[in-house]
Amino acid sequence: MARYVFVTGGVVSSLGKGLSSASLASLLQLRGFKVRIRKLDPYLNVDPGTMNPFQHGEVFVTDDGAETDLDLGHYERFTGISSTKSDNITTGSIYNDIIKKERKGEYLGGTVQVIPHVTNHIKKFISHKIKDEDFVICEIGGTVGDIESLPFLEAIRQFANEIGRNNSLFIHLTLVPYMKASGELKTKPTQHSVKELRSIGIQPDIIICRSEKNIPLAERKKISLFCNIDIENVIETVDVRTIYEAPISFNKEKLDTRVLEYFKIKNSKKPDLSRWKNITNKVLNSKKEVNIGIIGKYVDLKDAYKSLDEALTHGGIFNNFKINLSRIDSEELNNNNISSKLKNISGILIPGGFGKRGSEGKISAIKYARLNNIPFLGICFGMQMAIIEGARNLLDIKNASSSEFGNSCTPVVGLLNEWKKGKKVFKGNNKDLGGTMRLGLYDAVLKNNSLISKIYSMKKISERHRHRYEVNINYKEKFEKKGLIFSALSPDGLLPEIIELKNHPWFIGVQFHPEFKSRPFEPHPLFCSFIKASIKNQEKN
Ligand code: GLN
């Protein structure tokens, strides 16, 4: 039977529960165990798909087309295991299911309540589709003390009670702040947070303390005493220099050993951390740097392009270069200032995006990349903007645009009409926004002798999508006459998947999101190649 590890957070949000869970999962994996990580999110959205990345960070997409919390991206990158729809749940999705059932009369006249109906739903989710896993790590979003977290905490309390405390472990992650004025580390917020947790019946077994400074023995003793846990189970986590150092740092603090001791598992093999060490070393010690510009709308919040940043780092690791990333606000760009704003940039990347705001700045940057032989990678929205730029300046369709921005244009990019997945047919929809995009893995067939077929060294690829609009295939021949090649299409030949420019060193647009599949130990070929081309461009200048 699987053992369940529940990870909660206290004091403040953004302490790194996701990274801690992912690091623990990796360490257990390296000791030869099979793991699965899940995320339980207390907000009311059915999924984060309609949420603004500026508030919530990136929306991560799984193979099977779920729009999920960005922590699932960490899980995949740290464990190499692909997440699925059944690895992320929100309060909104639970209520959605329960209310649908209630309307059908499936509760047979009963009163539908948080306990037991909502909590039962959560408990079912926790162990859903768990088969031969040794460990299931469940991260509970939010902070202990939030009203909306309560049903989740109650559900995990019940779940642990039902499977037995020998098979369940509670980890609580808190903040131990450093007070500069008095030069002290403060344990009181941790004590209060644990008190809150205990008032709802959960006694943590391990406390991970996030802190700016190492936590001395005296403070560890205090936490142990007041929070009623073994002193060895007070684990510190100080800021790491790169996230890839986190598994190494948790191993040093013996987190994995404590977890195994708790479950009385003996004689497991020592984890071989050489891969993590190697990658950390490369990230920290690569001497050379390449300047990459991401031109987007959500440049102020780093998490808005989390997977993208990681995928670029992977491309850098592959080429032994550090990535010097500039986040450039597309709203500040126009044809007049572009050359000064992008002066030192060796590779231009336009990521996924939605809506008209900032699109003209992106189009200006694409024109600049095309005319000046600067490596360009356009992802999803980025590819659509490249088509608009090409239509305006290569095909001379001056009012070319996307119907996403309104109807008063020539729509070289338009609403997806219909698409298939296996035998299932989907219809385009821009009225209901949640979960109605073309989502998840779809195949694309690559054109022989194209740059893209060399990059992938494959004929057919499968990548994760998330879009509602498509490049209008009717312009294919016109574009190709001007050197803008449609170098991959969907297997039925109806949907443009990749475009590239013939007489340009490296100009590629993809309708999918390659960043979701890039992993530190399996860097994505598109990012490896884009960084390589950007280095070449930098060295030329
Ligand atoms: N807004 C565009 C669409 O829906 C692009 C989406 C994206 O970049 N993920 O097609």
Image (tube, grey):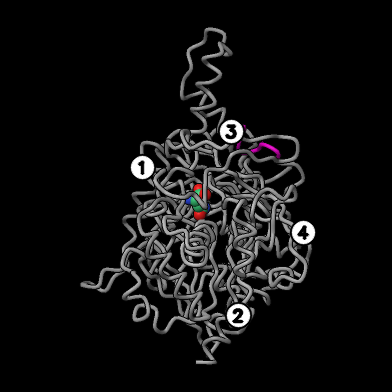
Q: Mark number for residue 510?
A: none
Q: Distance of mark 1 from mark 2, alpha carbons?
A: 55 Å
* Residue at x 48%, y 36% (from the top left corner): 46
Query: Which is nearer the eye, 36 or 254?
Result: 36
Q: Which residues are magenta?
A: 124-129
Mark earlier in primary sequence (1, 2): 1
Closer to us: mark 3 or mark 4?
4
Closer to us: mark 2 or mark 4?
2
Number of residues whose C-alpha sits closer than 10 Å to that of mark 1, classed few (under 14), some (14–19) or many (20 or more): some
Q: In the rendering, at what x and y percent does residue 437 appear?
A: 55, 42
Closer to us: mark 1 or mark 2?
2
Number of residues whose C-alpha sits closer than 10 Å to that of mark 2, classed few (under 14), some (14–19) or many (20 or more): some
What secondary structure is the stretch in magenta mostly built from? Answer: helix
Residue under pointer 1: 145
Mark earlier in primary sequence (3, 2): 3
Mark earlier in primary sequence (1, 4): 1
The kind of residue on which mark 1 rests is: Gly
Q: In the rendering, at what x and y percent does residue 394 appear?
A: 51, 67
Q: Distance of mark 1 from mark 3, alpha carbons?
A: 20 Å
